[in-house]
Protein backbone atom coordinates (compact mmCIF):
# COMPACT_ATOMS: atom_id res chain seq x y z
CA UNK A 1 0.00 0.00 0.00
CA UNK A 2 1.40 3.42 -0.98
CA UNK A 3 1.91 6.15 1.62
CA UNK A 4 -0.90 8.31 0.17
CA UNK A 5 -3.36 5.39 0.19
CA UNK A 6 -2.28 4.48 3.72
CA UNK A 7 -2.91 8.06 4.92
CA UNK A 8 -6.38 8.01 3.34
CA UNK A 9 -7.11 4.68 4.98
CA UNK A 10 -5.85 5.89 8.36
CA UNK A 11 -7.92 9.10 8.24
CA UNK A 12 -11.08 7.46 6.82
CA UNK A 13 -12.55 6.90 10.28
CA UNK A 14 -12.45 10.65 10.96
CA UNK A 15 -14.16 11.52 7.67
CA UNK A 16 -16.89 8.97 8.42
CA UNK A 17 -17.52 10.43 11.89
CA UNK A 18 -17.54 14.04 10.61
CA UNK A 19 -19.92 13.14 7.75
CA UNK A 20 -22.15 11.19 10.15
CA UNK A 21 -22.39 14.09 12.58
CA UNK A 22 -23.13 16.48 9.70
CA UNK A 23 -25.99 14.32 8.36
CA UNK A 24 -27.48 13.82 11.81
CA UNK A 25 -27.31 17.55 12.46
CA UNK A 26 -28.88 18.24 9.03
CA UNK A 27 -31.70 15.78 9.69
CA UNK A 28 -32.45 17.22 13.13
CA UNK A 29 -32.32 20.78 11.77
CA UNK A 30 -34.82 19.91 9.01
CA UNK A 31 -37.12 18.25 11.55
CA UNK A 32 -37.14 21.22 13.94
CA UNK A 33 -37.47 23.75 11.12
CA UNK A 34 -40.58 22.05 9.86
CA UNK A 35 -42.22 20.65 12.96
CA UNK A 36 -40.77 22.89 15.62
CA UNK A 37 -41.89 26.02 13.77
CA UNK A 38 -38.41 27.48 13.92
CA UNK A 39 -38.07 30.69 11.91
CA UNK A 40 -41.81 30.76 11.09
CA UNK A 41 -41.81 27.61 8.94
CA UNK A 42 -44.91 25.44 9.43
CA UNK A 43 -45.51 21.74 8.87
CA UNK A 44 -47.01 20.99 5.46
CA UNK A 45 -50.69 20.21 5.32
CA UNK A 46 -50.52 17.44 2.74
CA UNK A 47 -50.03 13.84 3.90
CA UNK A 48 -47.56 12.88 1.14
CA UNK A 49 -45.45 15.98 1.66
CA UNK A 50 -45.41 15.31 5.37
CA UNK A 51 -44.36 11.69 4.79
CA UNK A 52 -41.62 12.77 2.38
CA UNK A 53 -40.16 15.15 4.93
CA UNK A 54 -40.25 12.51 7.69
CA UNK A 55 -38.56 9.96 5.43
CA UNK A 56 -35.88 12.49 4.48
CA UNK A 57 -35.23 13.27 8.14
CA UNK A 58 -35.09 9.56 8.98
CA UNK A 59 -32.76 8.88 6.06
CA UNK A 60 -30.39 11.69 7.00
CA UNK A 61 -30.26 10.60 10.63
CA UNK A 62 -30.02 6.89 9.74
CA UNK A 63 -27.18 7.40 7.28
CA UNK A 64 -25.48 9.68 9.81
CA UNK A 65 -25.71 7.05 12.55
CA UNK A 66 -24.39 4.38 10.14
CA UNK A 67 -21.43 6.60 9.27
CA UNK A 68 -20.76 7.23 12.97
CA UNK A 69 -20.76 3.49 13.76
CA UNK A 70 -18.60 2.77 10.70
CA UNK A 71 -16.13 5.49 11.70
CA UNK A 72 -15.97 4.20 15.27
CA UNK A 73 -15.33 0.63 14.12
CA UNK A 74 -12.67 1.78 11.66
CA UNK A 75 -11.03 3.78 14.46
CA UNK A 76 -10.96 0.70 16.72
CA UNK A 77 -9.48 -1.44 13.94
CA UNK A 78 -6.87 1.25 13.32
CA UNK A 79 -5.94 1.35 17.01
CA UNK A 80 -5.54 -2.44 17.09
CA UNK A 81 -3.42 -2.26 13.93
CA UNK A 82 -1.24 0.51 15.39
CA UNK A 83 -0.78 -1.47 18.61
CA UNK A 84 0.27 -4.53 16.59
CA UNK A 85 2.64 -2.40 14.52
CA UNK A 86 4.11 -0.91 17.71
CA UNK A 87 4.53 -4.38 19.21
CA UNK A 88 6.23 -5.68 16.07
CA UNK A 89 8.43 -2.58 15.91
CA UNK A 90 9.30 -2.94 19.59
CA UNK A 91 10.10 -6.63 19.11
CA UNK A 92 12.19 -5.80 16.07
CA UNK A 93 14.02 -3.06 17.97
CA UNK A 94 14.69 -5.46 20.84
CA UNK A 95 16.03 -8.15 18.51
CA UNK A 96 18.25 -5.56 16.81
CA UNK A 97 19.49 -4.23 20.17
CA UNK A 98 20.26 -7.70 21.51
CA UNK A 99 21.97 -8.69 18.27
CA UNK A 100 24.23 -5.65 18.60
CA UNK A 101 25.23 -6.64 22.15
CA UNK A 102 28.68 -7.76 23.23
CA UNK A 103 29.82 -11.37 22.90
CA UNK A 104 29.81 -12.45 26.55
CA UNK A 105 31.17 -15.73 27.89
CA UNK A 106 30.32 -16.71 31.46
CA UNK A 107 32.09 -19.65 33.10
CA UNK A 108 30.80 -21.46 36.18
CA UNK A 109 28.00 -23.69 37.35
CA UNK A 110 25.35 -24.10 40.01
CA UNK A 111 22.94 -21.30 40.88
CA UNK A 112 25.59 -18.57 40.65
CA UNK A 113 26.00 -18.85 36.88
CA UNK A 114 22.28 -19.18 36.13
CA UNK A 115 21.59 -16.11 38.29
CA UNK A 116 23.78 -13.75 36.27
CA UNK A 117 22.62 -15.24 32.96
CA UNK A 118 19.14 -13.83 33.67
CA UNK A 119 20.59 -10.35 33.48
CA UNK A 120 23.01 -10.94 30.61
CA UNK A 121 20.27 -12.24 28.28
CA UNK A 122 18.59 -8.82 28.53
CA UNK A 123 21.60 -7.01 27.02
CA UNK A 124 22.83 -9.44 24.37
CA UNK A 125 21.80 -12.47 22.34
CA UNK A 126 25.46 -13.55 22.19
CA UNK A 127 25.82 -15.09 25.65
CA UNK A 128 27.80 -18.31 26.00
CA UNK A 129 27.54 -20.19 29.29
CA UNK A 130 30.38 -22.67 29.85
CA UNK A 131 29.12 -25.11 32.47
CA UNK A 132 30.90 -27.55 34.74
CA UNK A 133 29.86 -31.23 34.54
CA UNK A 134 31.00 -32.65 37.88
CA UNK A 135 27.66 -32.59 39.73
CA UNK A 136 27.09 -36.10 41.10
CA UNK A 137 24.20 -35.48 43.47
CA UNK A 138 20.43 -35.86 43.25
CA UNK A 139 18.79 -36.42 39.88
CA UNK A 140 22.01 -35.56 37.99
CA UNK A 141 23.95 -38.15 39.95
CA UNK A 142 21.41 -40.89 39.32
CA UNK A 143 21.40 -40.17 35.58
CA UNK A 144 25.20 -40.08 35.59
CA UNK A 145 25.29 -43.52 37.22
CA UNK A 146 23.08 -44.87 34.44
CA UNK A 147 25.75 -43.87 31.91
CA UNK A 148 23.54 -41.32 30.18
CA UNK A 149 25.90 -38.52 29.15
CA UNK A 150 27.08 -35.78 31.50
CA UNK A 151 25.12 -34.65 34.58
CA UNK A 152 22.40 -32.31 33.27
CA UNK A 153 21.42 -30.31 36.39
CA UNK A 154 23.59 -27.20 35.92
CA UNK A 155 23.03 -27.33 32.16
CA UNK A 156 19.27 -27.34 32.71
CA UNK A 157 19.42 -24.32 35.02
CA UNK A 158 21.42 -22.33 32.49
CA UNK A 159 19.13 -23.25 29.59
CA UNK A 160 16.11 -22.03 31.54
CA UNK A 161 17.92 -18.85 32.64
CA UNK A 162 18.67 -17.88 29.03
CA UNK A 163 15.12 -18.50 27.81
CA UNK A 164 12.92 -15.42 27.23
CA UNK A 165 9.96 -17.59 28.29
CA UNK A 166 11.61 -18.22 31.61
CA UNK A 167 8.57 -18.28 33.92
CA UNK A 168 6.54 -21.22 32.62
CA UNK A 169 9.63 -22.97 31.25
CA UNK A 170 11.34 -22.78 34.63
CA UNK A 171 8.31 -24.35 36.31
CA UNK A 172 8.16 -27.05 33.64
CA UNK A 173 11.86 -27.92 33.43
CA UNK A 174 12.35 -27.80 37.22
CA UNK A 175 9.27 -29.91 37.97
CA UNK A 176 10.29 -32.92 40.08
CA UNK A 177 8.31 -36.14 40.01
CA UNK A 178 7.06 -37.65 43.24
CA UNK A 179 5.57 -40.72 41.55
CA UNK A 180 6.21 -43.34 40.26
CA UNK A 181 9.10 -44.56 42.35
CA UNK A 182 11.43 -44.86 39.35
CA UNK A 183 11.01 -41.13 38.57
CA UNK A 184 10.87 -39.80 42.12
CA UNK A 185 13.29 -36.89 42.54
CA UNK A 186 14.04 -36.52 38.85
CA UNK A 187 13.35 -33.14 37.24
CA UNK A 188 11.56 -33.08 33.90
CA UNK A 189 14.33 -30.96 32.35
CA UNK A 190 17.01 -33.46 33.37
CA UNK A 191 15.02 -36.29 31.84
CA UNK A 192 14.53 -34.34 28.60
CA UNK A 193 18.25 -33.68 28.29
CA UNK A 194 19.03 -37.32 29.07
CA UNK A 195 16.38 -38.51 26.61
CA UNK A 196 17.65 -36.32 23.77
CA UNK A 197 21.21 -37.40 24.54
CA UNK A 198 20.07 -41.00 24.18
CA UNK A 199 18.29 -40.22 20.88
CA UNK A 200 21.09 -38.17 19.30
CA UNK A 201 23.97 -40.02 20.93
CA UNK A 202 25.60 -36.68 21.72
CA UNK A 203 25.14 -34.41 24.75
CA UNK A 204 26.23 -31.28 22.87
CA UNK A 205 23.59 -31.87 20.19
CA UNK A 206 20.93 -32.55 22.81
CA UNK A 207 21.73 -29.30 24.63
CA UNK A 208 21.63 -27.32 21.38
CA UNK A 209 18.28 -28.87 20.42
CA UNK A 210 16.69 -28.02 23.77
CA UNK A 211 18.15 -24.53 23.46
CA UNK A 212 16.24 -24.15 20.19
CA UNK A 213 13.04 -25.37 21.85
CA UNK A 214 13.47 -22.76 24.57
CA UNK A 215 14.58 -20.12 22.03
CA UNK A 216 17.48 -19.22 24.33
CA UNK A 217 19.51 -16.07 23.80
CA UNK A 218 22.94 -17.57 23.38
CA UNK A 219 24.48 -20.98 24.01
CA UNK A 220 24.94 -23.40 26.89
CA UNK A 221 28.19 -25.32 26.53
CA UNK A 222 29.30 -28.25 28.72
CA UNK A 223 33.00 -27.65 29.34
CA UNK A 224 33.73 -31.27 28.46
CA UNK A 225 31.63 -34.13 27.10
CA UNK A 226 33.73 -36.74 28.93
CA UNK A 227 32.64 -38.51 32.08
CA UNK A 228 34.79 -36.79 34.73
CA UNK A 229 34.88 -36.97 38.51
CA UNK A 230 35.94 -34.14 40.80
CA UNK A 231 38.43 -35.04 43.50
CA UNK A 232 39.96 -33.02 46.32
CA UNK A 233 43.01 -33.17 48.50
CA UNK A 234 42.05 -32.03 51.98
CA UNK A 235 44.22 -30.02 54.36
CA UNK A 236 45.42 -33.18 56.12
CA UNK A 237 46.56 -34.72 52.80
CA UNK A 238 43.70 -37.22 52.46
CA UNK A 239 42.00 -37.48 49.07
CA UNK A 240 38.22 -37.67 48.60
CA UNK A 241 36.27 -38.08 45.36
CA UNK A 242 32.88 -36.84 44.24
CA UNK A 243 31.44 -33.33 44.43
CA UNK A 244 28.82 -34.13 47.06
CA UNK A 245 31.40 -35.93 49.21
CA UNK A 246 33.78 -32.97 48.99
CA UNK A 247 31.12 -30.46 50.03
CA UNK A 248 29.93 -32.69 52.90
CA UNK A 249 33.48 -33.03 54.25
CA UNK A 250 34.12 -30.20 56.72
CA UNK A 251 37.89 -30.29 56.40
CA UNK A 252 39.62 -27.52 54.48
CA UNK A 253 40.38 -28.08 50.80
CA UNK A 254 43.99 -27.85 49.70
CA UNK A 255 43.35 -28.42 45.98
CA UNK A 256 40.90 -30.04 43.57
CA UNK A 257 41.53 -32.20 40.50
CA UNK A 258 39.69 -34.09 37.78
CA UNK A 259 39.71 -37.80 37.06
CA UNK A 260 40.76 -38.55 34.39
CA UNK A 261 43.09 -35.53 34.23
CA UNK A 262 43.35 -35.64 30.43
CA UNK A 263 39.67 -35.15 29.59
CA UNK A 264 38.96 -33.52 26.23
CA UNK A 265 37.74 -29.96 26.29
CA UNK A 266 34.59 -29.17 24.34
CA UNK A 267 35.76 -27.28 21.24
CA UNK A 268 32.72 -25.00 21.51
CA UNK A 269 34.01 -23.83 24.89
CA UNK A 270 37.35 -22.80 23.40
CA UNK A 271 35.56 -20.97 20.58
CA UNK A 272 33.40 -19.12 23.10
CA UNK A 273 36.48 -17.99 25.04
CA UNK A 274 38.54 -16.90 22.04
CA UNK A 275 35.60 -15.16 20.37
CA UNK A 276 34.36 -13.23 23.41
CA UNK A 277 34.41 -9.48 24.02
CA UNK A 278 34.37 -10.08 27.78
CA UNK A 279 34.63 -13.18 29.98
CA UNK A 280 33.06 -13.56 33.43
CA UNK A 281 34.37 -16.17 35.84
CA UNK A 282 31.79 -16.98 38.49
CA UNK A 283 30.08 -16.22 40.74
CA UNK A 284 29.57 -19.62 42.27
CA UNK A 285 31.06 -22.32 44.44
CA UNK A 286 34.82 -21.84 44.23
CA UNK A 287 35.93 -25.48 44.30
CA UNK A 288 32.90 -27.21 42.75
CA UNK A 289 31.61 -24.72 40.16
CA UNK A 290 34.46 -22.44 39.06
CA UNK A 291 37.72 -24.39 39.37
CA UNK A 292 36.44 -27.61 37.71
CA UNK A 293 36.03 -25.67 34.45
CA UNK A 294 39.60 -24.39 34.66
CA UNK A 295 40.95 -27.89 35.32
CA UNK A 296 39.84 -29.19 31.91
CA UNK A 297 42.98 -29.12 29.71
CA UNK A 298 42.92 -26.24 27.23
CA UNK A 299 40.61 -23.89 29.13
CA UNK A 300 43.27 -21.93 31.00
CA UNK A 301 45.45 -21.79 27.89
CA UNK A 302 42.53 -20.24 26.00
CA UNK A 303 42.00 -17.74 28.82
CA UNK A 304 45.69 -16.80 28.75
CA UNK A 305 45.67 -16.11 25.01
CA UNK A 306 42.22 -14.57 24.52
CA UNK A 307 42.06 -10.86 23.76
CA UNK A 308 38.98 -10.48 25.97
CA UNK A 309 39.32 -9.25 29.55
CA UNK A 310 38.64 -11.97 32.13
CA UNK A 311 36.77 -10.76 35.22
CA UNK A 312 36.24 -12.78 38.37
CA UNK A 313 32.83 -11.97 39.84
CA UNK A 314 33.62 -12.42 43.53
CA UNK A 315 31.32 -14.31 45.85
CA UNK A 316 29.49 -12.22 48.41
CA UNK A 317 29.28 -14.84 51.17
CA UNK A 318 31.48 -17.75 52.20
CA UNK A 319 30.16 -21.25 51.53
CA UNK A 320 29.73 -24.25 53.75
CA UNK A 321 32.09 -27.12 52.99
CA UNK A 322 34.27 -25.02 50.69
CA UNK A 323 35.28 -21.53 51.76
CA UNK A 324 34.54 -21.02 55.45
CA UNK A 325 36.84 -18.26 56.69
CA UNK A 326 37.97 -17.24 53.18
CA UNK A 327 38.51 -13.60 52.27
CA UNK A 328 38.75 -12.15 48.76
CA UNK A 329 42.48 -12.89 48.49
CA UNK A 330 41.92 -16.55 49.36
CA UNK A 331 39.44 -16.88 46.49
CA UNK A 332 41.74 -15.14 44.00
CA UNK A 333 44.79 -17.15 45.11
CA UNK A 334 42.92 -20.40 44.46
CA UNK A 335 41.99 -19.28 40.94
CA UNK A 336 45.25 -17.68 39.86
CA UNK A 337 47.28 -20.51 41.41
CA UNK A 338 46.11 -22.89 38.68
CA UNK A 339 48.27 -21.18 36.05
CA UNK A 340 51.87 -20.01 35.82
CA UNK A 341 50.78 -17.40 33.28
CA UNK A 342 48.39 -14.58 34.25
CA UNK A 343 44.91 -14.78 32.75
CA UNK A 344 42.78 -12.71 35.15
CA UNK A 345 42.18 -9.07 34.27
CA UNK A 346 40.26 -7.91 37.30
CA UNK A 347 37.72 -8.65 40.00
CA UNK A 348 34.18 -7.36 40.45
CA UNK A 349 33.27 -7.03 44.12
CA UNK A 350 30.09 -6.23 45.99
CA UNK A 351 30.00 -2.87 47.79
CA UNK A 352 26.89 -3.44 49.91
CA UNK A 353 26.98 -4.73 53.46
CA UNK A 354 24.37 -7.37 54.23
CA UNK A 355 21.88 -6.61 56.96
CA UNK A 356 22.44 -7.72 60.54
CA UNK A 357 19.55 -10.18 60.31
CA UNK A 358 20.98 -11.88 57.24
CA UNK A 359 24.50 -11.83 58.66
CA UNK A 360 23.22 -13.48 61.86
CA UNK A 361 21.49 -16.21 59.85
CA UNK A 362 24.69 -17.01 57.97
CA UNK A 363 26.74 -16.80 61.16
CA UNK A 364 24.71 -19.65 62.69
CA UNK A 365 26.12 -21.87 59.95
CA UNK A 366 29.67 -20.62 60.44
CA UNK A 367 29.50 -18.41 57.37
CA UNK A 368 30.04 -14.70 56.82
CA UNK A 369 30.32 -11.98 54.21
CA UNK A 370 33.54 -12.25 52.21
CA UNK A 371 35.99 -9.60 53.37
CA UNK A 372 36.99 -7.59 50.31
CA UNK A 373 40.55 -6.71 51.35
CA UNK A 374 42.66 -5.99 48.28
CA UNK A 375 45.92 -7.77 49.07
CA UNK A 376 45.60 -10.23 46.17
CA UNK A 377 44.36 -7.49 43.84
CA UNK A 378 47.62 -5.60 44.37
CA UNK A 379 49.71 -8.77 44.36
CA UNK A 380 48.48 -9.85 40.92
CA UNK A 381 48.08 -6.32 39.56
CA UNK A 382 44.36 -6.75 38.97
CA UNK A 383 41.76 -4.10 38.25
CA UNK A 384 38.94 -3.87 40.76
CA UNK A 385 35.37 -2.67 40.21
CA UNK A 386 32.90 -2.25 43.04
CA UNK A 387 29.18 -2.64 42.32
CA UNK A 388 26.10 -2.81 44.60
CA UNK A 389 25.48 -6.49 43.87
CA UNK A 390 23.99 -7.96 47.05
CA UNK A 391 20.30 -8.88 47.01
CA UNK A 392 18.80 -10.39 50.16
CA UNK A 393 15.85 -12.74 49.84
CA UNK A 394 16.24 -15.19 52.68
CA UNK A 395 19.76 -15.70 51.38
CA UNK A 396 22.22 -13.46 49.52
CA UNK A 397 22.56 -13.53 45.73
CA UNK A 398 24.05 -11.32 43.05
CA UNK A 399 22.01 -8.59 41.36
CA UNK A 400 22.10 -9.79 37.75
CA UNK A 401 20.73 -6.52 36.37
CA UNK A 402 23.41 -4.35 37.99
CA UNK A 403 26.14 -6.63 36.66
CA UNK A 404 24.53 -6.68 33.20
CA UNK A 405 24.38 -2.90 33.04
CA UNK A 406 28.09 -2.70 33.89
CA UNK A 407 28.81 -5.03 30.96
CA UNK A 408 26.38 -3.26 28.63
CA UNK A 409 28.12 0.07 29.31
CA UNK A 410 31.37 -1.44 28.00
CA UNK A 411 33.34 -0.29 31.03
CA UNK A 412 35.20 -3.58 31.20
Image (spheres, grey):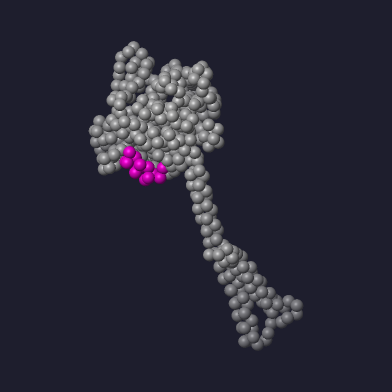
Please count the marks in the image: 0
Q: Is residue 275 above or below residue 338?
A: below
Occupied quadrant, residue 265: top left
The overriding secondary structure of the stretch rendered in magenta is helix
Q: Is residue 273 above or below residue 374?
A: below
Residue 383's spot in the image, x, y percent?
53, 25
Please tell me which residue is depicted at 59% across the width and 65% down the height of the picture: 4
Bounds of the magenta span?
Answer: 204-216
Please tell me which residue is depicted at 28% across the width and 30% down the height of the picture: 227
> Is residue 210 covered in magenta?
yes
User: Closest to the observer: 316 or 337?
Assistant: 337
Q: Is residue 57 above or below residue 273?
A: below
Residue 197's spot in the image, x, y percent?
28, 39
Q: Is residue 170 left or right of residue 81?
A: left
Please tell me which residue is depicted at 63% across the width and 77% down the height of the picture: 57
User: Closest to the observer: 311 or 406?
Assistant: 311
Q: Is residue 30 left or right of residue 309?
A: right
User: Closest to the observer: 221 or 58?
Assistant: 221
Residue 308's spot in the image, x, y percent?
48, 32
> Is residue 75 covered in magenta?
no
Residue 137's spot in the image, x, y percent?
31, 28
Occupied quadrant, residue 292: top left
Regarding residue 410, the answer to whether it shows in the image is yes
Regarding residue 363, the answer to whether it shows in the image is no
| Residue at the front extreme, as displayed | 305
| Residue at the right extreme, as displayed | 39
Please tell me which residue is depicted at 57% across the width and 63% down the height of the picture: 3
Amino acid sequence: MSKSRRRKSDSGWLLSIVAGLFLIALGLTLFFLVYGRIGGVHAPAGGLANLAILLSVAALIGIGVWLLVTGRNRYRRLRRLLRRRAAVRSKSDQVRRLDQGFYITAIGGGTGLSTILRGLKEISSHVSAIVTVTDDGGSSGRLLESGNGVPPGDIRNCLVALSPREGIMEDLFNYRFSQPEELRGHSLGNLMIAGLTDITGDTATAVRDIGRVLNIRGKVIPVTLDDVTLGAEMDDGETVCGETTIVADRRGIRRVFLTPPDSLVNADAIDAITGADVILLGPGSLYTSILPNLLVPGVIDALVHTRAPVWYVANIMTQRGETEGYNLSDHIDAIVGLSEEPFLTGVIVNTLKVTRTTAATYRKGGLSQVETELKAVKKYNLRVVGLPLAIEDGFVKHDADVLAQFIAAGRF
